[in-house]
Amino acid sequence: MKIVLLESLSVSKECMKKYTDMLVQEGHSFQCYERNDDPEVQIQEIGDADIVMIANMPLSGKVISACPNLKFIDVAFTGVDHVDLQAAKEKGIAVSNASGYSNESVAELVLGMMLSLLRNVPQVEERCRKGMTKDGLVGRELKGKTVGVVGTGAIGSRVAELCHLFGCEIAAYDLFPKKNAPEYLHYGTLEEVLSKSDIVTLHCPLTEDSRNLINQDRIAQMKKGAILINAARGPIVDSKALADALNSGYLRGAGVDVFEMEPPLPMDHPLLHSINTIVTPHIAFASDESMEIRAKIVFENIQKWMNKEQVNIIL
């Protein structure tokens, strides 16, 4: 089999060598390229490969259709909305993802954003550097707050668990509520969750149903003074509506790790200029630990697929 990796997996050379040597020793070829989002370049790099590995770079139907030998797309990411699944399905190409690799990393960043926003960390840090005091910026505790978790898959459930350990009440919304959910997970409608939560954190996949889910009308259903966290997918939130709610003071703050496009963001993006907003350049999934877990998963995906035992199945 010819295997092509189109972008770095962000692990050490030693870690990559361990996995690629195993494939080469079994008689397969492995080639790694620097990321390039140009479809024409991707077509050239994939060439006659049987397997392509990507992380969060777009893989269009044009590229998929132009690669005659492609049989397996191995996505080193949880979400796969950046892959043209319809094109893959039409060509009978199998697709697997790396579900679960970043559960802890995302959950921990979400908790960090909650705590930073509640305690006004960005503002008081800036004041301290200027020789000023905390006057007027006394924060609030996480304990006792109601946290609304929208999407209770693996990451959302872990966030709920951590918030519960902090002493929070957990309100949850999911199109498919978990069976045998923990007793602290209280499901309700989206309207109920938004209206009662001091903090709303998003953990749902991007679908046509969830696109623009948090818009002007939904924000109006949230509690005045609530906090919104988005470490799921950018298009789930209307950025302009969120920025307006922050700048008007209707929402207390927001933590945003994902946007309509991958960073770098255009300098006129509304959330770069909204108050009480922590923005990070899509880092929630990225930690040393999660990157090593991810590498292990995606190389196991290849071995399993070649043994006709596909796992982490998308298609």
Image (tube, grey):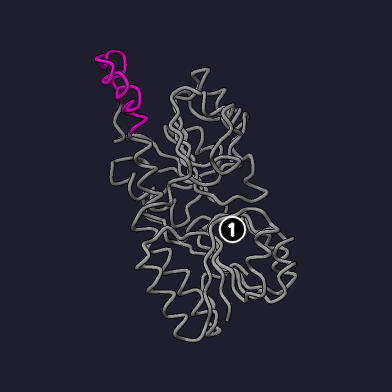
Q: Nearer the viewer, residue 53 or 275?
A: 53
In the image, residue 136 lies at what x, y percent? 31, 13
The residue beneath circle 1 is 80
In the image, residue 123 lies in the stretch drawn in magenta? yes
Where in the figure is residue 230, as x and y percent of width and height? 49, 40
Which image quarter is the C terminus in? bottom right
Q: Residue 5's image quarter?
A: bottom right
Closer to the camera in the image, 260 or 45: 45
Q: Nearer the viewer, residue 18 or 96?
A: 18
In this view of the protein, which residue sits in the foreground, 60 or 119? Answer: 60
Lateral position of residue 305 relative to residue 124, left or right: right
Q: Is residue 142 above or below residue 181?
A: above
Q: Is residue 124 above or below residue 49?
A: above
* Region of the chain picked out in magenta, as a range: 116-139
Q: Secondary structure at mark 1?
A: loop
**Residue 158, x across and y down, in percent:** 38, 53
With respect to residue 249, does 82 lie above or below? Answer: below
Q: Is residue 237 magenta?
A: no
Quadrant assignment, res 16: bottom left
Q: Amino acid at mark 1?
A: Val
The residue depicted at 32 percent of the width and 28 percent of the height is 121
- Which residue is rendered at x = 56% and y = 74% of the image? 3
Q: Position of residue 94 (x, y in %)?
A: 63, 73
Q: Quadrant of residue 143?
A: top left
- Which quarter of the rendering shows the N terminus? bottom right
How would you rate the neighbour count of disc 1 (Cα within 10 Å): few for under 14, some for 14-19, many for 20 or more? many
| Image side of residue 45 versus residue 174, left or right | right
Above or below 295: residue 160: above
